[in-house]
Amino acid sequence: MAENFDTEAFYAALNATRLSRQKTWKDVAQETGVAASTLSRMGQGANSDVDGLAALLRWSNLKAEMFIRGGSKKEASPIAKLTALLRADPHLT
């Protein structure tokens, strides 16, 4: 992740999700496959790798675009959205 990703805000939102689910950071690590040490470093401002970020986003139901600094307010084109949806479908080749 680059400096355009607000790790601090993401970690705060992740922590709020964790607390609302009454989970420990150890629980989050076990459920996401992200090392507890990575979660600890994120709490200190370090970035996660892409796979770790994806796992945490999936676990928390947070959207990555919520944490992009200076992101465009313009919506993606319909063809870009459609392409992303089709590529995400595991039943399509």
Image (cartoon, rainbow, N blue to C red):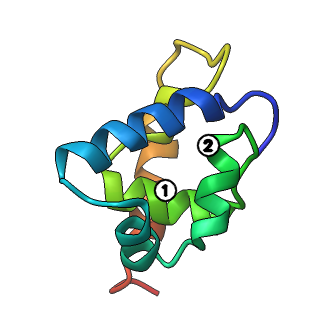
Residue of label 1: 83
Q: Position of residue 29 (x, y in %)?
A: 46, 71
Residue farthest to the left, as pictured: 21
Disc 1, SS: helix
Q: Is residue 64 left or right of residue 92?
A: right
Front residue (pair 76, 51): 51
Crowd tier of the residue under label 2, counting other residues whose Cα lies within 10 Å: few below 14, some 14–19, many 20 or above: some
Q: Quadrant of residue 23?
A: bottom left
Front residue (pair 41, 34): 41
Dots 2, 1 in contact, CB < 8 A: no
Q: Position of residue 11 (x, y in %)?
A: 52, 39
Q: Nearer the viewer, mark 2 or mark 1?
A: 2
Q: Is residue 89 left or right of residue 10?
A: left
- In the drawing, what numbered circle is on residue 43? 2
- In the drawing, what numbered circle is on residue 51? none
Q: Quadrant of residue 69?
A: top right
Label tally: 2
Crowd tier of the residue under label 1, counting other residues whose Cα lies within 10 Å: few below 14, some 14–19, many 20 or above: few
Q: Position of residue 27 (x, y in %)?
A: 35, 70
Q: Amino acid at mark 2?
A: Gly
Q: Is residue 79 above or below residue 12?
A: below
Q: Is residue 77 visible?
A: no
Disc 2, SS: helix
Residue placed at 42% from the left, 60% from the top? Answer: 25
Residue placed at 46% from the left, 58% from the top? Answer: 56
Q: Amino acid at mark 1?
A: Thr
Please report whichever mark, 2 or 1, sits nearer to the chain's N-terminal start.
2
Q: Position of residue 21 (x, y in %)?
A: 18, 53
